[in-house]
Image (tube, rainbow, N blue to C red):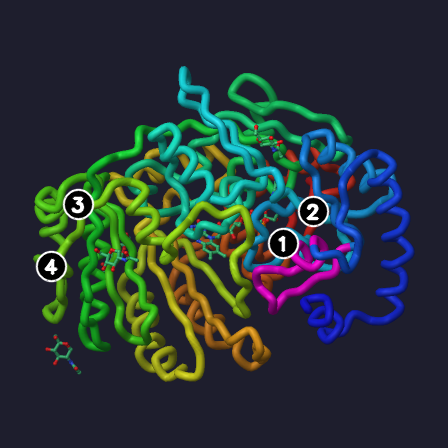
Amino acid sequence: MRVSTICQVGLIATAAEALVITRATIDQCLTDSGVPIDTQGSDGWVRDVTSFNIRLPYLPTAISVPTTIAHIQNSVLCGKKLGIKVSAKSGGHSYASLGFGGENGHLVVELDRMYNVTLDTTTNIATVQPGARLGHVATVLYEQYGRAIAHGICPGVGISGHFAHGGFGFSSHTHGLALDFVESVTVVLADGSIVEASRSENTDLLWGIKGAGSNFGIVASWKLSTFAAPEVLTLFGVDLGWNKSTAVAGLEAVEYYAKNKQPREVNFRIGDYNRGKPGIEGLYYGTPDQWRTAFQPLLDTLPAGYTVSEPKTSNWIEAIINYSNYDNIDWITPSTPENFYAKSLTLKGLNGTSAQNFVDYYFDVANNVVDRFWFYQLDIHGGQNSQVTKVANDATAYAHRDKLYLVQFYDRYETDETYPDSSFGFLDDWVDATTKPLPQSDWGAYANYADPRLSRETAVQLYYGDNLPRLRSLKAKFDPEQLFDFTQGITPA
Ligand SMILES: Cc1cc2nc3c(=O)[nH]c(=O)nc-3n(C[C@H](O)[C@H](O)[C@H](O)COP(=O)(O)OP(=O)(O)OC[C@H]3O[C@@H](n4cnc5c(N)ncnc54)[C@H](O)[C@@H]3O)c2cc1C
Ligand SMILES: *[C@@H]1O[C@H](CO)[C@@H](O)[C@H](O)[C@H]1NC(C)=O
Ligand SMILES: *[C@@H]1O[C@H](CO)[C@@H](O)[C@H](O)[C@H]1NC(C)=O
Ligand SMILES: *[C@@H]1O[C@H](CO)[C@@H](O)[C@H](O)[C@H]1NC(C)=O
Ligand SMILES: *[C@@H]1O[C@H](CO)[C@@H](O)[C@H](O)[C@H]1NC(C)=O
């Protein structure tokens, strides 16, 4: 079914024929070295070739399906020998289909058959295989060991893309980014070697993997620290009731609170999933009464018209399940695909003209887009008490710790519709209006919300900021021939 979608999108016949020839060669190399593959047209192929964002389908030359680290190594060696770019695919949730390399013709290393999670109960360090999905990781750690990690909420997202480029969720203000939990990694490098990167060996590689991990090799195993899963959490929500004349004041109140007052235990975002009805959703580490005390300073400064929902207590796994919007999060298979375009912003602040532009566009333009589903989310990422911000901006390759907001914009059509070119301007113009008054040093973009309409050069500047020069040197050291190249990859210095 998806294969025919790819054909409709217009793979040129000659290119398709060329791929068939190369496919036989690479499939042979993989099979000769004992690596399981998806043969074209098999059920496995159809599943693994389906991108989460069906707007961006790409046709791999071959798909290997490792179940061991040696299989990953042999996949890399075949790609190297035959001169075919290699892309790792973990959960396959890249917004730009970067698990396929963002283009046709790669050898895709499909990791999602490798999803085991174990914990060393002496050190409380988890070992996680590279194709495990977030919901499965959270379930095993909680149910078997009572442990937890801060990460995003969608149960089908893969550990590797998520942890290699950031990983922000409802516990990040309290506990940091997902990548802050990475103790060490086992990596297959472009020369086919298997190395460990930790605080004592290959420290530069570990630095690069923690924020720009898709560029240097394939992570074949993750070692992650964990914390004791909290038993008392409070889920809270506020319907903000903003309109065009109150929203700027509302944003300024949120910004002041987030920068100066928000205790570490308060995690929240502003989101609008319902055209012009923005609300707060959040998770507090403590009881509802403690939350009321911690949150009252913000409520006291919000414009009139808001409604606070009754806060709800829950334990760790209930909170994760609540925000996933599913009943069961223990997933080892992909999410249902969507047809969308998304963008992101990381912002030091959104005040003055920038807030006014954001709000004007929101009420004058966005709210008139009524023929499809769209949303934005403004995550409170930084601020003086955020664990994300407590780590130095150059301590890992993740370059946005000095940013207060992590913003996502998402514009979706139905899967049987075509996303028209004329619709890209909706989000592009919203982002442009918001950033226009800001100096370049005050904003960037998030690699985990990859935006395929950014040129490679713009993308790497916005994703990696001041860390880019060092990352280019690392690329020259670990992958000078660019075996792991992709459409938004870092080029070697
Ligand atoms: C429904 C949904 C909800 C989301 N929610 C959040 C959220 O709450 N917070 C947040 O921060 N993000 C969120 N994201 C974004 C998500 O973090 C990224 O899309 C992430 O990169 C997906 O990881 P993946 O392994 O599923 O993707 P993939 O498409 O498999 O991979 C993404 C990138 O990582 C590379 N990669 C994959 N495996 C490896 C490996 N083993 N070694 C090296 N490189 C590798 C790929 O080549 C590709 O470049 C969400 C995405 C979706 C679709
Ligand atoms: C996962 O663990 C189970 C149980 O130990 C084992 O049988 C299986 O082979 C493991 N899977 C992989 C991909 O390593
Ligand atoms: C906006 O909301 C405020 C507060 O609820 C209200 O007083 C005001 O009348 C509203 N303005 C418009 C234009 O609806
Ligand atoms: C999650 O919690 C919020 C706040 O208590 C509540 O409004 C919502 O209905 C819950 N959602 C689910 C899926 O349980
Ligand atoms: C906007 O942010 C800057 C930098 O944080 C701050 O100095 C300024 O006072 C803010 N302006 C408003 C209107 O809040």
Whole-percent x and y of residue 491? 68, 46
Tell me: 233 left or right of 29. left
- Could you tell me which quadrant the C terminus lies in? top right
Real-space CA distance between mark 2 and mark 3, rounded to the nearest whole angstrom: 43 Å
Three-letter amino acid code at the position of disc 2:
Ser
Q: Is residue 404 visible?
A: no
Badge 1 marks a residue whose secondary structure is helix
Q: Is residue 147 visible?
A: yes
The reply to whether the C-beta atoms of the residues labelled 2 and 3 are less than 8 Å apart is no
Q: Which residue is label 1 attached to?
A: 98
Q: Residue at x 24, y 64 (%)?
A: 279
Mark drawn on residue 87: 2
User: Mark 2, residues whose alpha carbon is within 10 Å: few (<14), some, or many (≥20)?
Assistant: many
Badge 4 marks a residue whose secondary structure is loop
Q: Residue at x 41, y 33 (%)?
A: 141
| Up-down relation of residue 61 to residue 422 (above or below) | above
